[in-house]
Image (tube, rainbow, N blue to C red):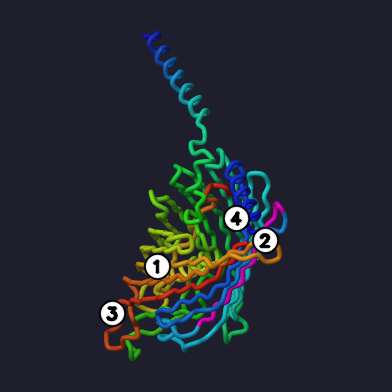
Amino acid sequence: MAVTRLLKAALGALLLCTFSCIASVLPSDRADVMYHSYSGGGVSIDGPAVMLRSKVAQDFSVAGYYYIDTVSGASIDVVATASAYSEERTEKHLGVDYLAGNSLISTNFSTSDENDYHAKTITFGISHDTFGGLTTLNLQTGLGDDEVGKNGDINFKEQVRRYNYKLGLTQILTTNWIAALNIQFDLDEGFLNNPYRQVRFKDPTAALGYSYQAEIYPRTRNSSAVSLVNKYYLPYRAAIGLSVRHYQDSWDISANDVELEYVHPLGKDWTFEGKVRYYQQTEASFYKDLFEYANELNFMARDKELSDFSNVTAGLGVSYKLPSYGIFSRQLQPEMTVQWDHIIFNYNNFRNVTDRTSAAGAEPLYQLDANVVRAFVSLYF
Amino acid sequence: MAYLQNKRKLLLLAFAIATLSGCANIEPWVKPYERDKLADPIMGFGRHPAALQHVTHVRDSREAAKGASGAGGGGCGCN
């Protein structure tokens, strides 16, 4: 029975490659159960995630994703201006893919809920194979509607509208090399700052030499990003990936990142992967670590994510295929994977205000290390 | 002189037609039976979608830049 199935699978794969890759295909069926964790800068975020993707008809595939974040601890912002807290965020996605000839039409609805923030997003995309299956064109548009609240202030209610447009071109260049060029435009409008975060300004009457006031952000942000992603099959069975991206927005933030990835299977059951990534950005035009006085500018931010900084990531991963088995006329192939990333953030204009021994504005620059772990079991069927 | 200019224009036209007709004849240069390496799972962009969602979330929460990541299709170019 297993041999028959194997033959059918091999025949199917052969037919797929024979017709080629002239036709689109639905995403492969799989289920994932994952534990994820982020730990760094005094904050711990972890929780489970479940993903299921399955064909329900010859031309239809559905996908569901359920994800929980439990946040605990206190970041440097919280230590400086508030008390430690704990909260939970739940994210849900439901997606449908429809295959029509050489085109794949996809739509996805997702929600993200926490006690003071609710976000809903809907996306619609179409991807089309052309030029004998060598070229894939993708178009996607998304609309997001967020509701922003503030714990302790039941009257605080703001909205954010998000629009995004993506255009992608994936091209097979040689028998070993595939590349993709992506462009994305984002338009966000509404309440874009964090209602809890504050900026600091010089205040000679304060014991520390500075006081705090609420951040004020512009109510619109337009951004564009362009990336080039490459994957190359080496002369032996291993692959390298190289991705570069440039980002620019209307808040004067310019960012670049580059990532190099290496995937190396060992035998038929083990796959090892390693990656390094470098990211750097400039600061927003209205960002300052220490403002000269209260209400110095129309817009004021001291969010370290809007500051001038860089980070370096080193990551390792290993996957192991467990023996496959048959159940309900399906052949299941389980696989276990563990991935670990270590990220070092270096801020060039965000100072560590928890150092109370230095004068205002002369504190050491902030730096943090983070560890990110993902452990998951995948079931291919 | 006018003759020479006309000749130059004709030559340019002939070159343009030859070039364009050449373009029309460009055929997919990687045949379906040559895509076995590209179809290997190790060549997939974002081989583990759930893990990729987490990676993107971690980055988007801590960096100003967002978007244009990943790729549509991939592997053997089948989708």
Disc number at residue A364?
3
Labels 1 & 2 near each other (Cβ < 8 A): no
Labels 1 & 3 near each other (Cβ < 8 A): no
On the rendered image, what quadrant is the N terminus of chain A found in?
Answer: bottom right
Q: What amino acid is at disc 4?
A: Thr
Q: Chain of mark 4?
A: A
Q: Residues within 10 Å of mark 2 (few under 14, many from 20)?
A: many
- Earlier-in-chain disc, 1 versus 2: 2
Calculate the distance from the C-alpha at mark 4 to the C-alpha at mark 1. Answer: 31 Å
Circle 4: element type: strand
Residue A69 position by quadrant: bottom right
Calculate the distance from the C-alpha at mark 1 to the C-alpha at mark 3. Answer: 28 Å
- Earlier-in-chain disc, 1 versus 3: 1
Disc number at residue A315?
1
Residue A126 versus residue A5: which sits nearer the camera? A5
Disc number at residue A62?
2
> Magenta stretch: residue A2 in it?
no
Position of A81 relative to A254 (above/below): below
Q: Chain of mark 3?
A: A
Q: Residue at x 59, y 63 (%)?
A: A380
On the rendered image, what quadrant is the C terminus of chain A found in?
Answer: bottom right
Q: Is residue A280 left or right of residue A168?
A: left
Q: Residues within 10 Å of mark 4 (few under 14, many from 20)?
A: some
Q: Which residue is mark 4?
A: A141
Circle 2: element type: strand
Residue interval drawn in magenta: A58-71
